[in-house]
Image (spheres, grey):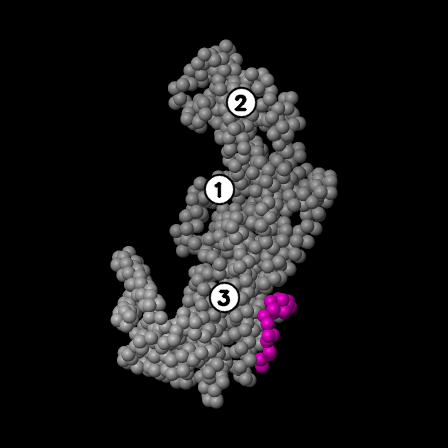
């Protein structure tokens, strides 16, 4: 039974209640069919820091399209959802909220503060799930996970302990990136470099023993950070620098604090930079730290956790680092120790989360030894268990990062996260690392730090499946099939999942990784709060509907490329769906009680039927092929062309002849073809536009409860009909040619015209004669003449199509001079196409490397254009002779 569709497409009404119905019916859960091939995706867990943005909408739409198509193709699909606790990011949000209330986390204490963060998490997790629903994501919520749930916490502890036991996790004092606002360590990739205004400060470091050098009793040191001078423990020169050989071993005084430090020789120093002499501050610079280790220098930390100066900074203790810089510069000037100040703009590290300038700080932290894990990941790419990157170029990016990776600092000085499973004996200082706390716990104190968020996220593909236990889900759905994520977290997340999965499961975490770009505004700018150009995807859905947003997001770019959001494109997306809606409504209104679309016997197919089914077949093949390669933009273009042009503009219009005829068989055949093509088209579109396709499908005759589980269209070889496509193309070209002539002559469709078609091609002549009904309908001809040899009227407009010339006598409208100019332009156009085609086919690189069918098609184009060019030149000569 069909049900009547609304006269107007209203996305709010179409989408209302549909998602809840899908959930109630359990259609998103795995099929449970053990004979079906499994296909799994784990959702990249959004941070519980706030609402989803357009980037999330893009990322999840692509995943939903993949999983919906695979479900319809008969795979046993699992799309597992979850969220990330996002340690530093979430804690920063909650601390900012508390600051607005005049409270700090220290006022609350760890336990109470963590309770506040859980409240935050619960609020935003509920918001995120509502947004998932509005987007139509076909997630299996019965398997939802959170990176701080007990199962994942168990996996995190297991991994930490195993890596520690293998010597791949260690604790040590090193220079690390430090966020003074969040008061925590950062990994290298959590530091964003930005250009800041600064200066080169040229400072005098006096000799201690009366030595002079180049007539001066001091050496000149250039620094950008005078506030770290209080931590200087040496001055270094390059051992090959002839200028300073005699100074090695001498001692100088650190200004303002008058600490005596040696001049040392070390290869680290670049003789070409500055004066070729650098101050060494082992506690405040990673390179100086290494120099200090080589020369057994003292490490003097001069800053507190919040980047204020500590007791080692002398009279500057308690001052903010930047206030201390100003004060020190002023004192150096007053004491005659500042030689000059040169303003510069230089790249400075900032915290990705809080935005403050990062400090290089000496700190005791936990690290992962990365070299063995990275080597294993690189080696795996040469095996059958390698990860396939889309686009392929990102594999090189992945490999280069792995080859140059540094040890990963994994401890964070936070309260929200997985607390490190290490305990220190209060009496002996012994360290115990284990999955469970020591039995005599009163003698032990757990490390207060938590693990980097990415440590738990790196386990996501297998920890969510129940690992370390051998669960049924783990055995069936791991490794997962496809990961979809942004290229901006290739290092943060994708790389870490790969090496952790190989280390603990001996398998890749996913077969494919599809990397998309960033969403930008119409001017190409990254969306940000500071620019005020962010767009809430829920606002877009409220205005256009989820299907329109999904269509835009899925078809607007190619893999690996950024996407520009545009309201004009959203208007186009809505218009396309409205076109589908109106076409579907027309079809359904004309089915007259058909309960199941059944194609008529092939012997009863008209040219238009053969053509639309052949085009449908080609579209199914094209879309399926492009989906498999994740080229959703190409798949979308194929769908758009088929639906808008082939189905709506031509087949539906042609169907009106049969539907209004007295021939019952012809009418019933056309109804069935219409129903069949619409059914297949809706199924093709469903992964991209789930709501509107389900709504329409429920309004037409169908089998099954929901389109979600309906079989995905497949290619039928018997539908392929190149001849029908060629014949129909000729018919369409004819109609378009006449329409163009009408347009140029300002002859409206309401005014009948005489039409003359000259062709020596017997097949083409037969096609035109057999389909006069369509020529009449679309050209509104008064008298139609089709012949092999027609003498062109003196005053007529003409057009050249393949193997035919079309004449429209319009004596009262035709100016021969204007017609000559128009045909001359046609000649130029065809000459240009022939030249282009010859050049392309003359390129050995194209002919040798392009697929055979592409080369053959180009040869066909060249022959066609040459035929048209000959006919157009003949017509031009004919007109010229009449003038």
| Disc 3, SS | helix
Q: Position of residue 406 (x, y in %)?
A: 48, 39
Q: Is residue 241 visible?
A: yes
Question: Which of the marked residues, 2 or 1, is nearer the chain's N terminus?
Answer: 2
Q: How far apart are labels 2 and 3 at the CA level?
A: 64 Å
Please tell me how crowded label 2 is: few (under 14), some (14-19), or many (20+) other residues with Cα within 10 Å.
Answer: many
The structure residue drawn at horizontal position 58% and vertical position 66%, both measured from the top left corner, is 28
The structure residue drawn at horizontal position 61% and vertical position 41%, both measured from the top left corner, is 354
Q: Position of residue 521 (x, y in %)?
A: 54, 52
**Residue identified by numbered label 2:** 233
Question: Foreground residue, 3 or 472?
Answer: 3
Q: How far apart are labels 1 and 3 at the CA level?
A: 37 Å
Point out the stretch of residues depicted in magenta. 1-24
Q: Position of residue 808 (x, y in %)?
A: 36, 76
The quadrant where residue 615 appears: bottom left
- The quarter in which the N terminus is drawn is bottom right
- Residue 70 is labelled as 3
Task: Reply yes or no: does residue 597 show up in magenta.
Answer: no
Please tell me how crowded label 3 is: few (under 14), some (14-19), or many (20+) other residues with Cα within 10 Å.
Answer: many
Cβ–Cβ below 8 Å for labels 2 and 1? no
């Amino acid at each position: 039974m069909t049900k009547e569709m609304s006269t107007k497409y209203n996305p709010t009404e179409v989408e209302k209640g549909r998602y809840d119905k899908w959930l109630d019916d359990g259609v998103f859960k795995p099929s449970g069919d053990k004979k079906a091939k499994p296909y799994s995706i784990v959702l990249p867990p959004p941070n519980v820091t706030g609402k989803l943005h357009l980037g999330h909408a893009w990322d999840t739409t692509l995943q939903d399209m993949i999983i919906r198509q695979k479900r319809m193709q008969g795979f046993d699909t699992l799309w597992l959802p979850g969220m990330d606790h996002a340690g530093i990011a979430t804690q920063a949000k909650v601390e900012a909220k508390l600051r607005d209330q005049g409270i700090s986390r220290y006022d609350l204490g760890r336990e109470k503060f963590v309770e506040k963060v859980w409240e935050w998490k619960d609020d935003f997790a509920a918001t995120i799930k509502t947004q998932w629903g509005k987007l139509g994501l076909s997630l299996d919520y019965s398997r939802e996970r959170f990176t701080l749930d007990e199962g994942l916490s168990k996996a995190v502890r297991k991994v930490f302990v195993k890596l520690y036991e293998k010597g791949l996790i260690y604790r040590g004092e090193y220079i690390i990136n430090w966020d003074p606002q969040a008061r925590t360590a950062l990994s290298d990739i959590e530091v964003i470099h930005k250009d800041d205004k600064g200066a080169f400060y040229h400072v005098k470091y006096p000799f201690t023993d009366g030595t002079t050098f180049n007539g001066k009793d001091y050496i000149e040191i250039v620094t950008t950070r005078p506030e770290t001078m209080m931590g200087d423990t040496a001055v270094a020169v390059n051992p090959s620098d002839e200028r300073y050989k005699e100074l090695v071993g001498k001692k100088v005084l650190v200004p303002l604090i008058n600490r005596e430090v040696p001049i040392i020789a070390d290869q680290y120093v670049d003789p070409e930079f500055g004066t070729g002499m650098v101050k060494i501050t082992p506690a405040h610079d990673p390179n100086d730290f290494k120099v200090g280790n080589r020369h057994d220098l003292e490490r003097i930390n001069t800053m507190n956790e919040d980047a204020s100066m500590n007791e080692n900074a002398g009279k500057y203790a308690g001052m903010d680092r930047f206030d201390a810089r100003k004060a020190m510069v002023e004192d150096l000037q007053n004491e005659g120790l500042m030689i000059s100040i040169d303003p510069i703009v230089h790249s400075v590290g900032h915290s990705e989360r809080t935005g403050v300038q990062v400090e290089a700080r000496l700190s005791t932290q936990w690290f992962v030894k990365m070299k063995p894990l990275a080597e294993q990941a690189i080696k795996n790419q040469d095996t059958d268990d390698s990860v396939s990157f889309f686009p392929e170029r990102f594999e090189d990016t992945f490999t280069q990062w792995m080859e140059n990776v540094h040890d990963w600092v994994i401890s964070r000085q936070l309260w929200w996260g997985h607390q490190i499973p290490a305990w220190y004996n209060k009496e002996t200082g012994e360290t115990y690392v284990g999955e469970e706390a020591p039995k005599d716990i009163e003698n032990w104190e757990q490390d207060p730090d938590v693990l980097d968020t990415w440590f738990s996220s790196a386990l996501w593909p297998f920890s969510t499946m129940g690992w370390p236990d051998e669960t049924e889900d783990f055995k069936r759905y791991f490794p997962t099939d496809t990961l979809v994520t942004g290229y901006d977290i290739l290092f943060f997340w994708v790389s870490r999942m790969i090496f952790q999965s190989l280390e603990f499961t001996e398998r890749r975490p996913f077969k494919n990784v599809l990397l998309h770009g960033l969403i930008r505004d119409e001017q190409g700018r990254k969306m940000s709060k500071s620019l005020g150009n962010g767009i809430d995807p829920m606002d877009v859905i409220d205005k256009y509907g989820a299907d329109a947003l999904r269509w835009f997001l899925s078809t607007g770019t190619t893999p690996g490329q950024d996407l520009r959001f545009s309201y004009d494109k959203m208007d186009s997306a809505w218009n396309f769906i409205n076109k589908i809606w109106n076409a579907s409504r027309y079809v359904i209104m004309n089915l007259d009680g058909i309960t199941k679309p059944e194609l008529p016997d092939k012997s009863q197919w008209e040219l238009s039927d053969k053509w639309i089914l052949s085009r449908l077949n080609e579209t199914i093949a094209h879309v399926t092929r492009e989906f498999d390669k994740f080229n959703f933009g190409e798949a979308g273009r194929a769908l758009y062309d088929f639906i808008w042009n082939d189905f709506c503009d031509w087949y539906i219009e042609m169907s009106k002849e049969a539907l209004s005829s007295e021939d019952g068989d012809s009418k019933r055949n056309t109804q069935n073809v219409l129903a069949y093509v619409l059914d297949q088209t809706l199924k093709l579109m469903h992964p991209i536009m789930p709501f509107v396709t389900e709504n329409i499908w429920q309004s037409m005759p169908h089998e099954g409860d929901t389109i979600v589980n309906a079989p995905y269209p497949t290619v039928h070889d018997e539908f392929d009909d190149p001849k029908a496509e060629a014949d129909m193309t000729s018919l369409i070209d004819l109609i378009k040619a006449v329409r163009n002539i009408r347009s140029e002559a300002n002859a409206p469709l309401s005014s009948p015209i005489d039409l003359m078609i000259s062709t020596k091609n017997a097949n083409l002549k037969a096609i035109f004669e057999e389909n006069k009904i369509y020529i009449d309908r679309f050209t509104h001809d008064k008298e139609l003449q089709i012949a092999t040899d027609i003498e062109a009227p003196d005053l007529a407009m003409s057009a050249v199509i393949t193997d035919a010339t079309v004449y429209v006598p319009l004596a009262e409208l035709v100016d021969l001079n204007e017609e000559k100019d128009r045909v001359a332009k046609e000649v130029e156009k065809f000459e240009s196409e022939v030249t282009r085609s010859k050049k392309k086919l003359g390129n050995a690189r194209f002919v040798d490397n392009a697929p055979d069918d592409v080369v053959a098609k180009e040869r066909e184009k060249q022959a066609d254009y040459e035929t048209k060019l000959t006919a157009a030149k003949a017509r031009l000569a004919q007109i010229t002779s009449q003038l």
